[in-house]
Amino acid sequence: MRLAASALEEALAAQNSWVESTAEKWLGANTAIFGLFSLAGIATAKDALNGLGKAQKWLVAIALLTAVGAAAGAVTLGYRAAYGWPRMVSVEGEDLLKWYAETRSYAPRAIPFLHRALFLSFASLGALTVVMLLVWLLPRG
């Protein structure tokens, strides 16, 4: 019985570590991807909207705001999956048991945040693709 309990404890610790590590790696990939898009946007932004009408510029702006919002959500949820939400914790009496239970349930709580972060990352990349297509393909006046 003790061996099984010890094995379970080790498995939970390994699972928590794996989820945290995965979320941290995904954050690095996200940062690199969004950084590259930002550099490309800065390099081409000066003349990108020349000749577009007001309605066309609004389409580009809406797609860009969607991309930025989704990227911000992806990073926020990724950090939440990797590190949780910082807060002070008392470790006296019942609070210690509560902290222990929360620590053991880290992975099941973090995985949905990581899933949402992945979804928002792809949504952001999709919206950035729409921005590029709009800038390239909208007729100039």
Image (cartoon, grey):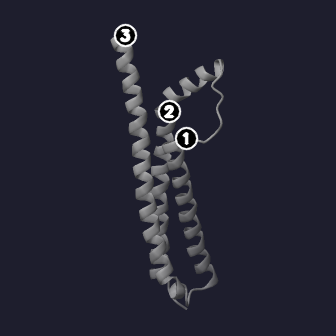
The N terminus, quarter of image = top left
Are discs 1 and 3 less than 8 Å apart at CB? no
Q: How far across and how far down the image is residue 93, in percent?
A: 65, 18
Q: Does residue 129 appear anywhere in the picture?
A: no
Check the image and report above or below for 77 versus 18. below
Q: Position of residue 46 (x, y in %)?
A: 53, 86
Q: Quadrant of the C terminus?
A: bottom right
Q: Residues within 10 Å of mark 2 (few under 14, many from 20)?
A: many
Cα distance in 3D space between marks 1 and 2: 8 Å
- Which amino acid type is marked by label 2? Tyr
- Between 105 and 122, the residue placed more toward the observer is 105
The first of marks 1 and 2 along the sequence is: 1
| SS type, badge 1 | loop
Residue shown at the point (33%, 12%) measured from the top left: 3
Kindly identify the residue that appears in the image at 34 percent across and 19 percent down: 7
Give percent across and percent down for residue 68.
56, 64
Residue found at x 42% / y 56%: 28
Q: Secondary structure at mark 2?
A: helix
Residue at x 50%, y 32% (from the top left corner): 106
Q: Secondary structure at mark 3?
A: helix
Q: Please report whichever mark, 2 or 3, sits nearer to the chain's N-terminal start.
A: 3
Whole-Å distance between the Cαs marked 1 and 3? Answer: 30 Å
Crowd rating for badge 3 (residues with CA inside 10 Å; few <14, some 14–19, many 20+): few
The residue singled out by tag 1 in the image is 84
Assess whether mark 3 and mark 2 are in contact (beta carbons under 8 angstroms). Answer: no
Point out the tag, 1 or 3, that comes first from the N-terminus. 3
In the picture of the structure, the residue carrying the numbered disc 3 is 2
Q: Which mark is residue 106?
A: 2
Query: Could you tell me residue 45's position as x and y percent?
Result: 52, 82
Relative to 30, does residue 106 appear above or below in the rendering? above
Q: Is residue 88 left or right of residue 64?
A: right
Q: Amino acid at mark 3?
A: Arg
